[in-house]
Image (spheres, rainbow, N blue to C red):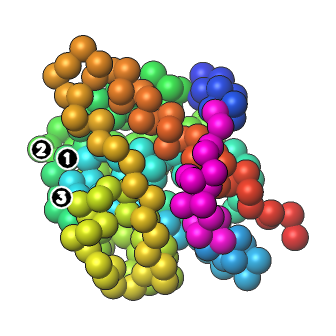
């Protein structure tokens, strides 16, 4: 794990999770634990409307925390109800929190390689619809990270479970003096909850 990212995670570990949020996160913990117990791959698809902010943060932090806690065979994805592009502030926020980010192309919808450790495969991120060929077609949990996608997609084909884990959109602060603060805050909120989720998994069977 990169040194600055390890420092961020040490800070995250001190953030308390409310009982209300723990209750919301419990079905995700149960899904992951069941897959681990059955020695099956864990596939998580984080879904938001535009696949530009929250869903990517959740994908990246979930994959990172799985590695941090030694939970094997976890594969995290993200998608939207429509494809747009990852908002530039997301990559900037992740770099500030210790990730290494490489933009692989310069298209309208750029592809990013995001690394949390020198020797681990990067997380490949770009905006896509939730059922894009890049994403799993079956045996996955669909995590709805925004109210719009949650309410607009009552059924996700191929998902074993559909779990609402909503976060406020930092987009509300775009162009304001609070923009940097709110993006960092939202990233750390998502990180702290993914830290909690994977800390509850017993993978030493």
Kindly state the secondary structure of the residue where label 1 is placed: loop
Q: Residues within 10 Å of mark 1 (few under 14, many from 20)?
A: some
The disc, 2 or 3, on the residue closer to the chain's N-terminal end is 3
According to the picture, the residue beneath numbered tag 2 turns out to be 108
Query: Camera-side residue: 149 or 104?
Result: 149
Query: Picture coordinates of residue 150 (x, y %)?
Result: 31, 66
The label number, if any, that marks residue 85 in the structure image: 1
Query: Which of the 4 image quarters holds residue 24?
Result: bottom right
Helix, strand or loop: magenta stretch: helix
Disc 3 to disc 1, C-alpha distance: 7 Å
Query: Outermost residue, front direction?
Result: 20
Q: Quadrant of the C terminus?
A: bottom right
- N-terminal of the pair, mark 1 or mark 2, is 1
Q: Which residue is mark 3?
A: 83
- Element carrying mark 2: loop
Write the residue at 17% across / 62% down.
82
At 26% from the left edge and 74% from the top edge, which residue is drawn?
153
| Magenta segment includes 29 | yes
Q: Are there few (<14), some (14-19), or many (20+) residues within 10 Å of tag 3?
A: some
Residue 175 lies in the magenta-colored region: no
State which region is magenta: 15-30
- Looking at the picture, does residue 77 appear above or below residue 111? below
Q: Are marks 1 and 2 in contact (CB under 8 Å)?
A: yes
């Amino acid at each position: 794990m990169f040194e600055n990212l390890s420092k961020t995670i040490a800070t995250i570990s001190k953030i308390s999770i409310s009982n209300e949020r723990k209750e919301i996160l419990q079905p995700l913990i149960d899904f992951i634990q069941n897959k681990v117990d059955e020695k099956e791959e864990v596939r998580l698809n984080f879904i938001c409307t535009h696949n530009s902010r929250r869903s990517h943060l959740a994908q990246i932090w979930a994959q990172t925390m799985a590695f941090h806690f030694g939970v094997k065979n976890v594969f995290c994805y993200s998608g939207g109800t429509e494809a747009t592009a990852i908002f530039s502030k997301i990559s900037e926020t992740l770099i500030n929190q210790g990730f290494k980010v490489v933009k692989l192309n310069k298209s309208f919808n750029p592809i990013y390689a995001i690394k949390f450790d020198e020797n681990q495969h990067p997380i490949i991120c770009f905006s896509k619809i939730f059922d894009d060929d890049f994403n799993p077609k079956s045996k996955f949990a669909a995590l709805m990270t925004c109210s719009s996608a949650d309410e607009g997609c009552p059924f996700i084909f191929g998902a074993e479970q559909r779990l609402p884990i909503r976060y406020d959109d930092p987009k509300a602060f775009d162009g304001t003096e609070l923009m940097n603060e709110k993006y960092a805050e939202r990233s750390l909120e998502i990180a702290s909850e993914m830290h909690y989720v994977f800390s509850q998994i017993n993978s030493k069977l």
